[in-house]
Amino acid sequence: MSPGLRRLIGLLRKEILQIWRDPSALAIAFVLPAALLLIFGYGVSLDARAVPLALVVQRPGALASSFTAGFDRSPFFRPRRYRTIQAAEQAMAAREVQGIVWLPSDFGRRAATGGNAPIGVLVNGVDANDARLIEGYVQQLWANWLTIRAEAAGGGAPLPLSVAARVRFNPAVSSRDYLVPGLIAVIMTLTGALLTALVIAREWERGTMEALMVTRVTLREILLAKLIPYFLLGMGGMAASVAIAVFLFAVPLHGSLWVLTAASALFMLAALGMGLLISGFARSQFVAGQIAIIATFLPAFILSGFVFDINSMPTAIRVITHVVAARYFVAILQSVFLAGNVWSVIVPNGLALAGMAAVFLGLARAIARKRLD
Amino acid sequence: MGGQVLALLIKELLAVLRDAKSRIVLIAPPLIQLLVFGYAATFDLNHVPVAIYDQDPSAASRDLVARFLGAPTFRLVAMLHSDRRIDALIDSRQVALVLVIDRRFTRDLLTGRPAPVQAIVDGRNSNTALLIEGYANAILTDFSLGWGAAHGQRAPPAVLDLRARYNPTLSSRWFIVPGIVALLTQVVTLLVVGLTVARERETGTFDQLLVTPMGPVAILLGKGLPGLLIGVFEASIIIAAAVWWFDVPLRGGLVPLYLGLFLFVVACTGIGLMISSLAATQQQALLGAFLFMVPSIILSGFATPIANMPGWVQDLTLLNPMRYFLVIVRGVFLEGSGVDALAGQYWPMGVMGVVTLAAAGWLFRRRVT
């Protein structure tokens, strides 16, 4: 056995003992991701279901009730009846309903004669995303109603166009199926950076890093000894997260486990490299922790494509997203889980992750070297 | 006691603001984040990449295609001439929508049969998929109604007149930017307060503080006030930026806004002090702050509505001060809500502030003995 390898094994043993005796690292690696994924997996959803909606029918009739029947049956709405539009508007101002569908008193007459009877739809636009989804559902119900009316009237097209929508990969359009893989990336960014940022800053702060440096171990051995155990811990947390996603949240895993493992390994290296880099910059745990929050969690949450669509961001912001490692991992995870082994997504994003891991680890090493001078 | 508190307050502010590194950490990142996130965090779709496969090149289909290309929502990536590349384009995320105009399109339009159009959407991001469907449907319906009217077909019995209250263009920036006020205020306040006691305990100066004539209440005030001042100050900058930089309308008054801000920062300060006094080391304090902050942001209604969560998670969010402040910020900004309309949001934060501050004070004393 070469002396280098023996030194490395010695250092590794020290790290593992340290982890074993201070279980906070184990907690960060396993308990934190599992707990976060459990809460968020249940808590984060963009699917509007049973939205409280005001229905105002000023003059009841057969046509009006055939229209409102669709709302009673829809899983998207929980309709409440109001006699006047004023009462409905008050309910909306008090946030009791999210929107109003209003059939004015001349609705029945105009619908039966000339057509084009206006149906007022007023949504609370504060949550613009929710408002758009609600509008979409109302439009669907309206189109269904037109089709039923046309069939009852003895055939003929309700509208000149017939639109068939087909959703690839996620036919039930369930937001949990795409949010849970993204959450894994966000949570692993957090744990990866925290694991290394804090443990190395602690070593600097306590002065034990200098003690290590005067021994014969090389810098590379110190960094490797830090990297290997936390890499294994992080991968363990990753495996736990994937198991929760598949078995508890029933997210389909169409791609192969090997691709997932390889991509996770690359991402974990990038995240740990980022943590090493942060701890190299910041000597104190205070600054390291602050940077870890600001530079990892928030960008992974907002700039990764996890909830907010990257294509829709302004160009300058899109450029910035390229330095967020989570962005590439989210793209791979969403494809591997929902679509399968789509190489045209996996290869470029995997290469980007490998590049980021190399840059972060290289920079971390370069900065650590300067410290020795 | 006033003089003691003031002295400690000045010392704490100096401790945070004298060090150039921590001064920068406090001021620069929130502003950069406001700018980046303000632009990045949007659910509005722009330049959605689209491919169109027009099997029936004709005047009618060209009119329909032109409507898609004229909309700022869509960006044409490819005109296809066969269906071979459709799946590959979507799989590799080069396009998010493929519009297929059927061979019988014009013939069916003219003979009064429903003319088939297919919209194939990438469902990996289900929210985007639903929104793309919505945008595409709006264009197709518009085309339908226009074509029917121009060609003397019978009008549909009823049409929808869609309007949105408070946010007529449904810009999600108006929803997100006020949310960022709450998000960054919480992050800054917790970071300032969360580590104060733990840092002194680690360096041993907390014991010195305890042997001074100051009582626990004075220490609590001296430790808590800097966070309060810095939190309110940073929030004010962000509010100003929201109004003058992002042009979000501020329809309500400053009184309901600042009353909410004050109660929110007090609650955050209380939680931060509690974490700080529970922790023996800075690392524990930092972890504690993290463990509180991350769920409180994700389960606050900042990005995904609380109404969509299962009942037990909704109950859990009742303990989250950010949930209440988000309603206040958005209510004051967009709906012009006043104090009485928001009363239900103020008192839970007030209760949380009192309880957490009392608990922090009790923990100080317990840790001494």
Image (tube, rainbow, N blue to C red):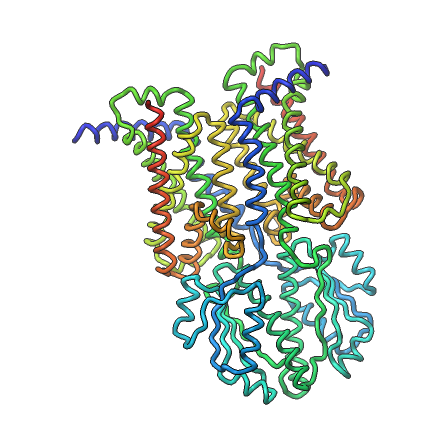
Quarter where residue A115 is shown: bottom right
Which residue is rendered at x = 74% and y = 55% of the image? A96
The quarter of the image holding the N terminus of chain B is top right
Q: Position of residue A95 (x, y in %)?
A: 74, 53
Which residue is rendered at x = 63% and y = 57% of the image? A130
Tell me if A336 is positioned left or right of B58 in this view.
Answer: left
* Residue sitting nearer the eye, A286 or A21: A286
Which residue is rendered at x = 50% and y = 57% of the image? A311
Where B193 sits versus A91, above or below?
above
- Residue A53: in sight, yes or no? no
* Residue sitting nearer the eye, A210 or A76: A210
Quarter where residue A202 is shown: top left
* Residue sitting nearer the eye, A78 or A323: A323
Tell me if A58 is positioned left or right of B108 in this view.
Answer: right
Where B210 sits versus B291, above or below?
above
Residue closest to the far left = A1
Q: Position of residue B305 (x, y in %)?
A: 62, 52
Quarter where residue A332 is shown: bottom left
* Residue sitting nearer the eye, A86 or A37: A86
